[in-house]
Image (tube, rainbow, N blue to C red):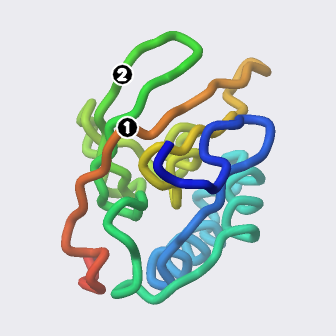
Amino acid sequence: MENSVNLSSPSIPPPLLVSRLDCERIEALLEKPSTRDIDTKALQAELARAEIVEPAQMPADVIAMNSTARFRDETSGEEHELTLVFPHETDGSAEKVSILAPVGSALLGLRAGATIAWPVPGGRTIQLRVLSIRHRPVTAGATHD
């Protein structure tokens, strides 16, 4: 790997970078009554350990809200390309994943090349490896309410 930071060991969580704007919006979402019945503990733990940076400081190789990421499920070998969105933006599209979905929560803040082990319903754990990232204007500070 081109980075000396441990990006490939699933036993040690990879470092996370989250923009202040994304963090504030996700925290506000988690306070809404509509998320009460959703298990958000893992997402909350990820936000707590993330390094929070200003939107303009987000590197291009980090998954932020409205980023499109190509990743591989190392457990199954399947590759996917999804855009990370807020729940109200999902619109039923197979190309979008909510931040509240296990895969969405797992991808937030990861760099290209990182691998993360993530719990999914049914007591299983999946291993996701980020292959590439495409960004949208929100990483430059634009809002999309």
Q: Quadrant of residue 29?
A: bottom right
Q: Residue at x 58, y 45 (%)?
A: 106
Estimate the x, y position of residue 95 in percent, counting from the top left. 25, 36
Quadrant the C terminus occupies: bottom left
Figure quadrant of residue 57 = bottom left
Mark toward the start of the polypeptide (1 vs 2): 2
27, above or below 129, in the image: below
Which label sits on residue 115? none
Which residue is painted at 36% across and 55% down in the image?
A: 85
The local secondary structure at tag 2 comes to: strand
| Residue marked by disc 1 | 131
Helix, strand or loop status at disc 1: strand
Q: Pointer 2: what residue?
A: 79
Residue shown at the point (46%, 49%) measured from the top left: 2
- Say how many tags the image has: 2
Give the amino acid at mark 2.
Glu
Marks 1 & 2, CB-CB < 8 Å contact: yes
Residue 121 horizontal side relative to residue 135, left or right: right
Coordinates of residue 92 in the picture (x, y in percent): 28, 36
Q: Is residue 98 above or below residue 67?
A: above
Foreground of the two, 26 or 58: 58
Of 47 and 13, which appears nearest the observer? 13
Task: List x then y, in percent, for residue 137.
Answer: 19, 74
Q: Residues within 10 Å of mark 2 (few under 14, many from 20)?
A: some
